[in-house]
Amino acid sequence: MKLNLLKNAKGFTLIEVLLVIAILAVLAAIVLIAINPPRSIAQSNNAQRWSNINAIINSIHQYAIDNNGIIPATITSVSTEICKTGAGSCAGLIDLGVVTFEERYILKIPTDPTSASANGTGYYVFKDAYNRITVEAPFAQLGDEIEVSR
């Protein structure tokens, strides 16, 4: 009777279980390679940078429109990092406090997702000889160049 119970016992053998685990491991590796999480994160960071520099340049132009075409006086012809307004000392940085004053043009200056410093945003701004403003994100990932001029 004991012999009869062992013959009717149902279950998986060790080889079958190991084979299923191996197949799942191969499929998981293929999915990870296809998704490439570091690249996806870098792409999302770059998308955030595009959004941020557009918000900054739009706030500067809205300020200029309300002030007869005069851009903030702190913007120079040398590419300089933008200060986090209200973050303390802005020595050596561009202070755009006039565009965040009373949250009229922008609530606060956005910061780079990976490269903001204690007082700096990680974004740079300058004007050319024609008072055209350029905002750039020099720390873009994947070799992208992210800048907007208006």
Image (cartoon, grey):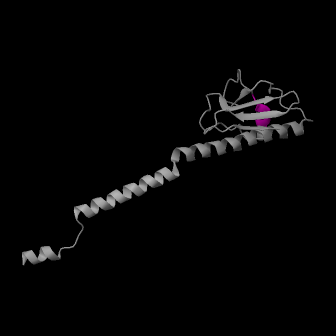
Front residue (pair 80, 69): 80
In the current view of this chain or complex, which residue is farthest to the right?
68
**From this viewpoint, which residue is outermost toward the left?**
1
Within the image, what quadrant is residue 111 found in? top right
Position of residue 46 measured from the top left corner of the image (x, y, whole percent)? 64, 42
**Can residue 103 be seen at all in this image of the molecule?**
yes
> Which corner quadrant of the image does residue 125 belong to?
top right
As for residue 121 lying within the magenta part, the answer is no
Which residue is farthest top? 91
- Give the main secondary structure, helix, strand or loop, of the magenta stretch: helix
- Horizontally, residue 37 falls left or right of residue 64, namely left
Viewer-proximal residue among 130 and 93:
130
Residue for point 79% across, 36% down: 99
20 on left or right of 57: left
Q: Is 149 positioned to the left or the right of 121 in the image?
A: right
Seen in the picture, residue 106 relative to 35 is either above or below; the reply is above
Q: Is residue 79 above or below residue 109?
A: above
User: Which residue is drawn at the image coordinates 33% and 57% (left, top)?
Assistant: 22
Tell which of 2 and 110 is nearer to you.
2
> Which image quarter is the C terminus in?
top right
Whether residue 104 is visible to the viewer of this picture, yes or no, is no
Q: Position of residue 62 (x, y in %)?
A: 84, 41
- Residues in magenta, as a range: 95-101
Residue at 59% x, 36% y is 114
Asked whether residue 98 is drawn in magenta, I would say yes
